[in-house]
Image: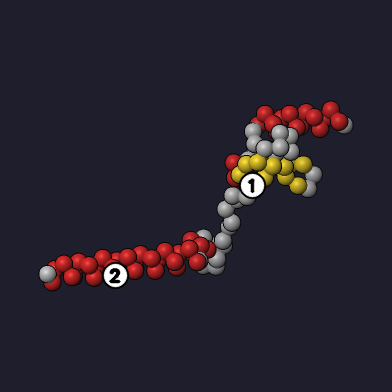
């Protein structure tokens, strides 16, 4: 009977420890990204949704095919859309 109680207490201690460590990690994601001086260099993951200017489809910014134009960057869903947009812009000029 004692062994059973010890196992149950150990299990609850393990669950508490695991939950406590996960709360600390999720509340401070920048601890993973440190620069050489030890300062926080948190970089936001670019999961932002953007719209393709040619086909109007939405997709994740990290999966895009960028095209720098003047002072901004346009994001495209594929190389084909990027090339079609580039051709349409040259036709308008």
Q: Sequence order check: which comes first, mark 2 or mark 1?
A: 2
Q: Secondary structure at mark 2?
A: helix
Along the viewing direction, whichever of 32 and 6 lies nearer the viewer: 6
Q: Is residue 62 above or below residue 36?
A: above
Q: Are marks 2 and 1 in contact (CB under 8 Å)?
A: no
Q: Is residue 86 above or below residue 2?
A: above
Which residue does the image show at 65% across and 36% down from the upper left? Answer: 77
Give how far across and how far down residue 31 sits, in percent.
49, 64
Q: For residue 67, say whether it is visible.
A: no
Q: What is the distance, in whole Å, between disc 2 and disc 1 at their CAs?
A: 41 Å
Going by the image, does 15 lie left or right of 8? right
Q: Secondary structure at mark 1?
A: strand
Label 1: which residue?
49
Going by the image, does 53 lie left or right of 22? right
Report the quarter where the N terminus lies: bottom left
Label 2: which residue?
13
Q: Residue furthest front?
A: 1
């Amino acid at each position: 009977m004692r062994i059973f109680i010890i196992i149950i207490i150990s299990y609850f201690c393990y669950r508490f420890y695991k939950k406590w460590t996960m709360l600390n990690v999720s509340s401070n994601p920048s601890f993973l990204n440190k620069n050489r001086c030890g300062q926080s260099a948190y970089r936001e993951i670019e999961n932002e949704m953007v719209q393709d200017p040619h086909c109007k489809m939405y997709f994740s910014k990290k999966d895009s095919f960028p095209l720098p134009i003047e002072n901004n960057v346009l994001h495209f869903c594929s190389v084909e859309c990027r090339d079609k947009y580039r051709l349409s812009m040259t036709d308008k000029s």
